[in-house]
Amino acid sequence: MLGAQSAPGEFDPSRRGSGSKAIKQALSTVDATRVKGLGVSGQQHGMVVLDKHGQVLRDCKLWCDTESAAEAEEISQKLNSVMVPSFTATKLLWLQRNEPEIWDRTAHVLLPHDYYNYYLTGRMVMESGDASGTGVFDTRRRDWDLPAMAVLEGEGWPAGRIRALFPQLIGASEVLGYVKDDVPAELGLPPEFSTRGSSGSSLRDSVSEGATIKAL
């Protein structure tokens, strides 16, 4: 996370050094030519905002950032459900009110490790399990919750402004894409290397503990 000079619970998503180092270390312990793909996991909640060119507009807000506590309470009352500041929806509403110049330029919203997948493949997507932590995902339908998104819509906005920010949904085992041509050399990856949807840290931990019974 950033130091005391920056807002609490924020991080510069362009600082990919630790993730790249981890990949290199993992590949150094095996025959890298036999590795055909990877799944990137990370903190489930957060907000990375990008412009129409795919450029990051500000430091991303992590799950532990609580500046959107007031927005979380407001959305909770409107939806009659509990919304905590970790959820992406609360951070978006905070951005609208506190950084309107950034908000006006925002064309895409990703979670922190979605952005790393975007760096690897050039594709913007979000895994459905991760999406459940945004506050605007219908877990029963496994699709975006349009009524919840409507709560974030401002007066006079074009219809679907919030929905247009969020990417395509994919499954945890679905192939996201192949790494861009310039990435394998940088990370020590073999050619034709694919990435998969994976999921957030808490969901991956649950699977590793055997908590895999399908919910009713």
Image (cartoon, rainbow, N blue to C red):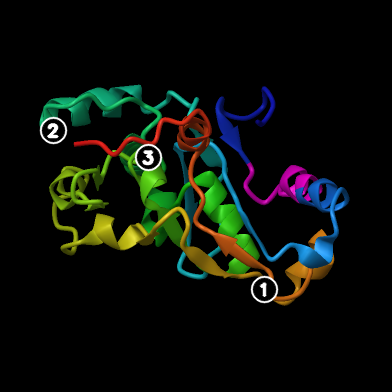
Whichever of labels 3 and 1 marks the residue nearer the N terminus, that label is 3
- For the C terminus, the quadrant is top left
Inspect the magenta stretch and tell me whether residue 13 lies in it. Answer: yes
Q: Front-most of 21 and 142?
A: 142
* Amino acid at pointer 3: Thr
Q: Front-most of 50 and 111?
A: 111
Q: Residue at x 41, y 43 (%)?
A: 99
Pinpoint residue 136: horizontal percent, then vertical percent.
Answer: 26, 44
Label 3: which secondary element? helix
Q: Which residue is mark 1?
A: 180
Inspect the magenta stretch and tell me whether residue 24 lies in it. Answer: no
Pinpoint residue 21: horizontal percent, then vertical percent.
Answer: 81, 47
Pinpoint residue 88: horizontal percent, then vertical percent.
Answer: 37, 40
Q: Front-most of 168 and 65?
A: 168
Q: CA distance from mark 1 to mark 2?
A: 41 Å
Q: Nearer the viewer, mark 3 or mark 1?
A: 1
Q: Residue at x 47, y 36 (%)?
A: 207
Q: Which residue is mark 2?
A: 79
Question: Would residue 93 appear left or right of 208 to someone viewing this image?
Answer: left
* Amino acid at pointer 1: Lys
Q: Residue at x 33, y 35 (%)?
A: 213
Q: Which residue is mark 3?
A: 88
Q: Give the crowd class for mark 3: few <14, some 14-19, many >=20 residues within 10 Å.
A: many
